[in-house]
Image (spheres, rainbow, N blue to C red):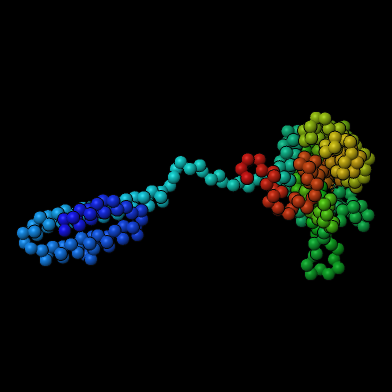
Amino acid sequence: MEERIQTLLQEINAYNATDKAGVEAYRLRYTSKKGVVGELFEELKQMPVEQKKTAGKILNELKQAAEAKLSALQEQVETSTASANALDLTLPPVPNTTGNLHPLTLTRYRIIEIFERLGFNVADGPEIEDDWHNFSALNFPENHPAREMQDTFFIEKKGVAGAPQDVLLRTHTSNVQIRLMKSQKPPIRAIMPGRVYRNEAISARAHCFFHQVEGLYVDKNVSFADLKQTIFHFAKEMYGKDVKLRLRPSFFPFTEPSAEIDVTCLICKGEGCVVCKRSGWVEIAGAGMVHPNVLRNCGIDPEEYTGFAFGMGIERVTQLRYRVNDLRLYSENDIRFLKQFNTSGIA
Ligand code: PHE
């Protein structure tokens, strides 16, 4: 019996368990009632009295060793699983993915920044507008073909069959110019960024909605030269000091004289490419001196005050800034497109 006890002791000392199942297997084999140690105690009962004493002593030692080992194994497995579940504070953090501003917003912010430094305020107005603020006050005569320059979305008047369509989605942000001149006395110096709508088929070059920034400066002695220098300053700030400006005569019912303003194409540096249709110039704005009729419609005396106005498309400015060549990308919300304007460095 002593020999068997010695081998068992060695076995017990060498036993190792890495998980709870291993510890349970140990318990069943050695320390449980039906385990080997228990069996030896049964055998002890049958032994002659004189042998019982010595054998009993070492058997008791084996029992104690086996139980001590069981507690040691239990503790070992417990602490190793606990540390596996614990937080590892040395790991680098997972960065938060942040969204970023839309390219049109970035351009709008930049435009506002440039004009604010020149003393222009930012003004806002409704996108659902009446005919008077969008057309009539701006010197578009009723039924005049000039209204067709801008394909308009009309909003039907409920329950008034055949009534003239008066409510519409604004076709330009000039409605805000009217609202400003009606509610404030000159000097007025403001820009009006906003969304506008035109009933056009959607393509790479046209969309049924887009964004404009219009500008208005009404005061005593405002001249065409002021207009030209303001736009020139803007173009240099936006596109760099090498940019050149070109004014072409044009027509808008609300300005007289009127001009279309081009800048040298930044994509081909004036050599000719698809964006500038091989001309070396791209149109960036319409502009002119506010028509005396428009001032009068808003209660401002054209003998006392003059003003200039201009309007530009934010999409066009953005196209030249970021080389985006399809207007549809701006409203499709494709994350692969939008992510390219992430300036935080975290994608
Ligand atoms: N409202 C014009 C347009 O949308 C732009 C413009 C504004 C032109 C101011 C001249 C002066 O086409």
Instruction: Residue 56: give x, y in percent of width and height.
Output: 12, 57
Instruction: Residue 258: give x, y in percent of width and height.
Output: 91, 41
Task: In this rendered view, identify the residue nearer to me: 329 or 258.
Answer: 329
Task: In this rendered view, identify the residue nearer to me: 28 or 224.
Answer: 28
Q: Quadrant of residue 304?
A: top right
Residue visible at 7% across and 63% down? 48
Q: Is residue 105 above or below residue 29?
A: above
Instruction: Residue 82: give x, y in percent of width and height.
Output: 37, 51
Q: Quadrant of residue 222?
A: top right
Task: State which quarter of the image contains the N terminus.
Answer: bottom left
Residue visible at 6% across and 61% down? 49
Residue occupying the far left of the picture: 50
Residue 56 left/right relative to 194: left
Quadrant where ligand 1 appears: top right
Residue 116 left/right relative to 13: right
Residue 65 left/right relative to 310: left
Instruction: Residue 201: give x, y in percent of width and height.
Output: 84, 57
Task: In this rendered view, identify the residue nearer to me: 326 or 88.
Answer: 88
